[in-house]
Image: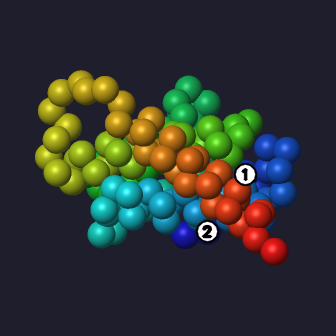
Amino acid sequence: MRAKEFLLTEGMDPKKTNKILHDFLQFAQEHLELEQMPKINFAQGSDRSVKHHSFGGYGNHKINISVSNRHIMDICRTLAHELVHYKQDLNNELNGRKPDPAIPLYRDWETDRKSTRLNSSHRL
């Protein structure tokens, strides 16, 4: 999956943000044990994306994420939240309000990223 270049430039190099996004989505797919990822649309500037950071139906395997004026890490947190709901929908578990399980997914990814960076920076 590749985000368009205009998307994720909130003070960062677009290539770096695309790599972060790709790494996060790969981690999320493995962590959530998703056989197939939903189609993810990145919305910029629409009325609906201004009011909501994400929107869309899970039954149609689509997630829409607003990227206007948002940092890549904020976008990844929103993706974590929506991907957990997507997984819940696949498992027919969206029948009541539960604590947000996306927070541990995002934290696990952040911990994994920091550990990988730390280990690679100490190599000779």
Residue at 30% x, 69% y is: 35
Q: Is residue 68 visible?
A: no
Please tell me the numbered disc located at residue 2. Answer: 2
Give the amino acid type for the residue marked by disc 2 in the picture: Arg
Residue at 70% x, 37% y is: 70
The quarter of the image holding the C terminus is: bottom right
Q: Say left or right for 80 vs 46.
A: left
Q: Position of residue 103 (x, y in %)?
A: 44, 35
Total numbered labels placed on residues in the image? 2
- Residue 56, above or below 119: above
Give the CA distance from mark 1 to mark 2. 11 Å
Q: Nearer the viewer, residue 2 or 50?
A: 2
Q: Position of residue 60 (x, y in %)?
A: 29, 55
Asked which quadrant contains residue 34, the reply is bottom left
Give the amino acid type for the residue marked by disc 1 in the picture: Leu
Local packing at callout 1 (Cα closer than 10 Å; few below 14, some 14-19, many 20+) is: many
- Which residue is under mark 1? 8
Q: Is residue 51 visible?
A: yes
Q: Position of residue 10 (x, y in %)?
A: 79, 44
